[in-house]
């Protein structure tokens, strides 16, 4: 409570964060006013607890063929709630019932790359990222959809034609490569002289 009866000589402070150092002061008051605060107590660290906050901004994508890249916003130190903090990454192909689980023991990590030759390019995966520390496993994020890496284009552009525009310029044209479910979108073309 903010105000404690004058005959009381101790109080329980609640709603503190786990595994955080605190110091305390006491102020006496009466009908005339408020006195000077006491000296600060010695620093006291609350006990550790299972992490209660899941990583945010879980996403990913990109990477190379046969890779699933998963990213997240790291959990700040004041929300880790104890020693031995790390991340639990869970993912499965969209429509599958079996989760694959991986552990990343680095506090600063914000990325995990799963490599497997059996991953089809641009396949959707359900992904969630959780946290743990020495006290146990904490909360998992909500599920995000992340796509595996794309493959390089498997065909050359067709219909290449060149038209002389001037003594120093040639205009080159071609038919664009259609979007392919397995190789992804074409980000650009390279024109080379032969």
Image (cartoon, rainbow, N blue to C red):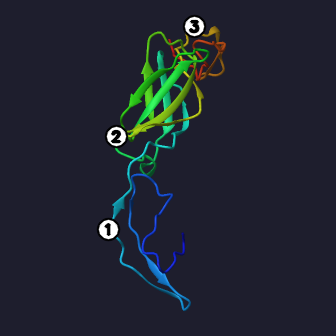
Quarter assignment of residue 163 = top right
Q: Which residue is disc 1 drawn over?
A: 42
Pinpoint residue 83: horizontal percent, then vertical percent.
Answer: 34, 44
Q: Secondary structure at mark 1?
A: loop
> Relative to 7, does residue 84 appear above or below in the rendering?
above
Is disc 1 surrounded by few (<14), some (14 to 19) or many (20+) residues within 10 Å? few
Determine the secondary structure under disc 2. Answer: loop
In the image, which is nearer the foreground, mark 1 or mark 2? Answer: 1
x 53%, y 19%: residue: 92
Lateral position of residue 2 relative to residue 164, left or right: left
- Residue at the spot 59% in from the left edge and 29% down from the top edge: 144
Please give the name of the residue rendered at 51% of the width and 40% of the height, measured from the top-left corner: 54
CA gap, disc 1 to disc 2? 25 Å
Q: Is residue 12 above or below residue 53?
A: below
Q: Which residue is mark 2?
A: 84
| Mark earlier in primary sequence (2, 3) | 2
Residue 4 image offset from top left, x and y in percent: 51, 75
Residue visible at 63% across and 13% down in the picture: 181
Find residue 190 and report its horizontal and vertical position in percent: 54, 19
Read off the residue under disc 3.
155
Which residue is nearer to you in this view: 188 or 19?
19
């Amino acid at each position: 409570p903010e105000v404690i009866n004058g005959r009381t000589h101790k109080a329980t402070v609640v709603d503190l964060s786990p595994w955080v150092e605190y110091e305390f002061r006491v102020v006496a008051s009466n009908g005339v006013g408020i006195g000077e605060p006491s000296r600060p107590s010695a620093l006291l660290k609350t006990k550790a607890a299972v992490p209660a906050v899941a990583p945010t901004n879980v996403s990913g994508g990109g990477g190379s063929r046969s890779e699933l890249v998963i990213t997240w916003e790291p959990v700040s130190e004041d929300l880790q709630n104890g020693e031995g903090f790390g991340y639990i990454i869970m993912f499965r192909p969209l429509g599958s019932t079996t989760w694959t689980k991986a552990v990343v023991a680095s506090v600063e990590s914000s990325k995990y790359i799963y490599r497997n030759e059996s991953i089809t390019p641009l396949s959707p995966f359900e992904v969630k990222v959780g946290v743990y520390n020495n006290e146990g496993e904490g909360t998992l994020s909500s599920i995000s959809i992340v796509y595996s890496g794309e493959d390089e284009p498997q065909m050359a552009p067709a219909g290449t034609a060149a038209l002389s525009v001037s003594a120093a310029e040639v205009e080159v044209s071609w038919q664009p490569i259609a979007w392919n479910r397995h190789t992804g979108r074409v980000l650009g073309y390279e024109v080379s002289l032969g």
